[in-house]
Amino acid sequence: MSRILRPRGGLAVSRRGLLRGGAVAVGGFALSGCDDLWRADAAKGVLTRAEGLHRWSQRALGGEALAREYTRADLSPRFRANGSRGVADAAYRRQLGEGFAGWTLRVEGLVARPLDLSLAALKDLPQRSQITRHDCVEGWSAIGQWRGPQLRGVLRLAGLSEQARYIVFHCADLYHGRPYYESIDLADAFHPQTILAWQMNGAPLEEAHGAPLRLRVERQLGYKHAKFVTRIVAVDSLQDVYGGKGGYWEDVGDYAWYAGI
Amino acid sequence: MAGTKVQESEQGGSRVILRHRLSTRLWHALNALTLLVLLMSGLMIFNAHPRLYWGEYGANYDASWLKVSSARIGAREFGFVQVANFRVETTGALGLWEDQDGRLQRRAFPYWMTLPSRYSLALARIWHLAFAWGLALGLLGYLLWSLLNGHLRRDIHIARKEWHPRAIWRDVTAHARLRFPRGEAARHYSVLQKLAYASVLFILLPGMIATGLAMSPGTDAWAPLLTQAVGGRQTARSLHFVFAFGLVLFFGVHMAMVVLAGPIKHLRAIVTGRMRIEKEPS
């Protein structure tokens, strides 16, 4: 026990001892048992395979269902920014200073016509505006308004190939020194609410929220909503992209690629 | 299945009855394991954002009704649990505690309560979401089976005469005096037992599953009424936590009753299904 933790009276020590003793008796099995079990690949394999069941059941029951949309009265007074709140990259800093006037979004990979789309070109496409709830994997939620072209419109413009299975989003930011990226499959890529948002709550996207462009994939958790998107690549497999698991958190931290629950 | 007469055998002044059917015993064992894993992994998930809110949204800038955290006043650092504006210091147990390596940690629930024991939201979610299937399918199967074999009607259903305040009061005082039913009366659940089991079967466990699903952005798209009926995603998260502690409370009382009413007898009953009851003196 450190000094800070030592309570003033002797009673508290014994009560805590009692509490801990009782809990060890109850949870002892799970505490050591499950930590050990996790190290066994078989258990890890079975448990992680449940992710497929989550995705399958959600897709079977959900189909094309739209995420709930709210009104302006429901907006969070202040929308928490998470992950990278800024980008250190010199080119990005310069573009930010210029209001992203010379910035372009690259669309490439398994497409007939690779594209370089300026912010003005993205704004000229048919726009979708939606007020949705952003659910973080940590448990908090915030409601915000988003506006931008549908991803499916951009993919059609580029002429998505028949072989494409996933859309990968490359971001300008490094998170803890590693490039952030995310990916979704075509079911989500062609979903009407999947947009490339350049506007939030009626104003151009702030840096903390991923300026100039962030993905909105409304039926999944926050870490799928890639910020600072600079490049979109259509691929047939995620295996050769960075760690091969389809996203930053998927690669570094055992987070599920399908984040609908 | 409080005591159907299958395979009864008489021995002197007592006889053995079948107290719990196989379906009850299997489900009970599966649930004991499943709920322990779900609770411990759930506490780890809570550690990722140790605040609870009401309504659809809620994050750090919004008012929380419950918060587990740590703070520092001068040189003194302490852990606390805060409900609305009421704060209780919990240093050593919640909010600020020492981990298995003697390191000071500022997370809500300590390592010996969580799964895994070291902070990992991702692994806790893998455990939690996989075992949630066991809870949901197990409950569904058990309720259907118990409906078909009459367990719910015969043993859990509370008859009108049992709802009589005097009958309930009689059972309350009997429990308070630690007078447990003997002989023929021990074959059936008392009204308080029925109320406790019915609350778990029809309120707490379905409530856990409903509020859990209501937190999923995927489910909210195809079943928006669920989240709306609950009162919003953050309300669902709060209720998920409240129901979980309802189950912990049930577990505490359940264990106390087993210990007071004869731990060997009842452990034997939940494992083998059989229980010895004394014959009523005639």
Image (tube, rainbow, N blue to C red):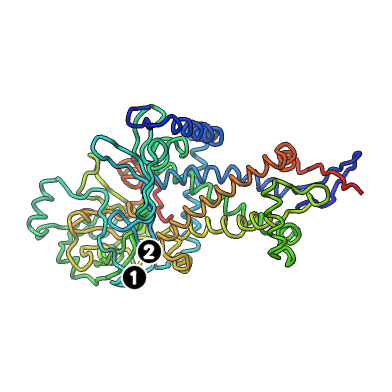
Residue at 42% over, 67% down: A64
Chain at numbered mark 1: A
Q: Is mark 2 on a helix, strand or loop?
A: loop
Residue B67 visible to an observer of this rendering:
no
B64 relative to B8 in the view: left or right:
left
Mark 2 residue type: Glu
Residue linked to disc 2: B56
Q: Is mark 1 on a helix, strand or loop?
A: loop
Q: Quick check: marks 1 and 2 in contact, CB under 8 Å? A: yes
Q: Mark 2 lies on which chain?
A: B
The answer to which of A17 and A43 lies nearer the viewer is A17
Q: Tag 1: residue type?
A: Tyr
Q: Give the x, y percent position of residue B5.
A: 85, 51
**Residue located beneath label 1 in the image:** A70
Residue B31 on image: x %, y %? 61, 46
- Residue drawn at (68%, 64%) of the image: B165
* Position of residue A95 in the picture relative to residue A253 (left or right): left
Q: Which of A179 and B262 is in front in this view?
A: B262
